[in-house]
Image: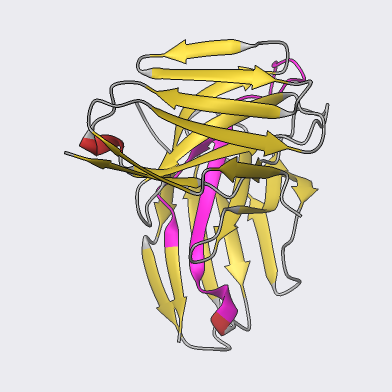
Amino acid sequence: AAGVIQSPRHLIKEKRETATLKCYPIPRHDTVYWYQQGPGQDPQFLISFYEKMQSDKGSIPDRFSAQQFSDYHSELNMSSLELGDSALYFCASGQRRGRPHYGDEQFFGPGTRLTVL
Amino acid sequence: SQQGEEDPQALSIQEGENATMNCSYKTSINNLQWYRQNSGRGLVHLILIRSNEREKHSGRLRVTLDTSKKSSSLLITASRAADTASYFCATDAGMNTGFQKLVFGTGTRLLVSP
């Protein structure tokens, strides 16, 4: 079965540079979630999109922005990178349309490991 | 503060033994999910249990949910070395919108020795 695709898998950047992470959800999934997992930490919610509109926002720095496109893929743009941005960035997808309001499983991609030097 | 906290933080057992991990949370929920993560890799969805369910099975996995105690447990029976990983519980913080941002627990590191 198709899974969530993230690219790139690894990314090395210098401080103050920018980075763009991409996420391709499972086909027919309409919701995308972004999470950040620091070393030895649990994943923290950043932002989510449903039908190309932002649906919720978590602890996402103002230096970061994201969007979901017409083909449902999503991009997380990170500017003025700091050392503390080094982390695993996960994208998860889910299917909300037509579902009851109990929510549903979120399926995670393999993550992008960002290292800021 | 963490919505979910897991106990124990680390667990070391022998192959064939059972492993039990516990998760506690603070707010009301719609569902609770368990994930496995091998070191530095992706999160693999294991099982979802809804707030109106008390127990759920999937293969060697058994999950229980006690909403009165705001706690859940994950039991892995007849463990294998390949079960070595970190296990996280995640809750949806009870938002009745269908947009369930997940709040993760701190995770349990399970080591299964051959």
Of all residues, the one furthest to the left in this rendering is: B114
Residue range in magenta is: A84-112
Q: Is A90 in the magenta?
A: yes
Is A41 above or below relative to A97? below
Give residue B91's quadrant in the image: top right
Residue A110 visible in this rendered orientation of the protein? yes
**Where, quadrant-wise, is the C terminus of chain A in this rendering?**
bottom left
Residue visible at 48% across and 36% down in the picture: B35
Please state the horizontal and vertical placement of residue B95, each as a whole percent of the image.
82, 32
Q: Is residue B40 left or right of residue A29?
A: left
Q: Is residue B101 left or right of residue A5?
A: right
Q: Is A39 in the magenta?
A: no
Who is closer to the viewer here, A7 or B5? Answer: B5
Give residue A99's quadrant in the image: top right
Give residue A7's quadrant in the image: bottom left
Please state the horizontal and vertical placement of residue A107, each as a whole percent of the image.
50, 35
Who is closer to the viewer here, A65 or B72? Answer: B72
Please say which color scheme the image uses. Answer: secondary structure
Please state the horizontal and vertical placement of residue B97, each as a whole percent of the image.
82, 29
Residue visible at 59% across and 42% down in the picture: B6
**Where, quadrant-wise, is the N terminus of chain A in this rendering?**
top left
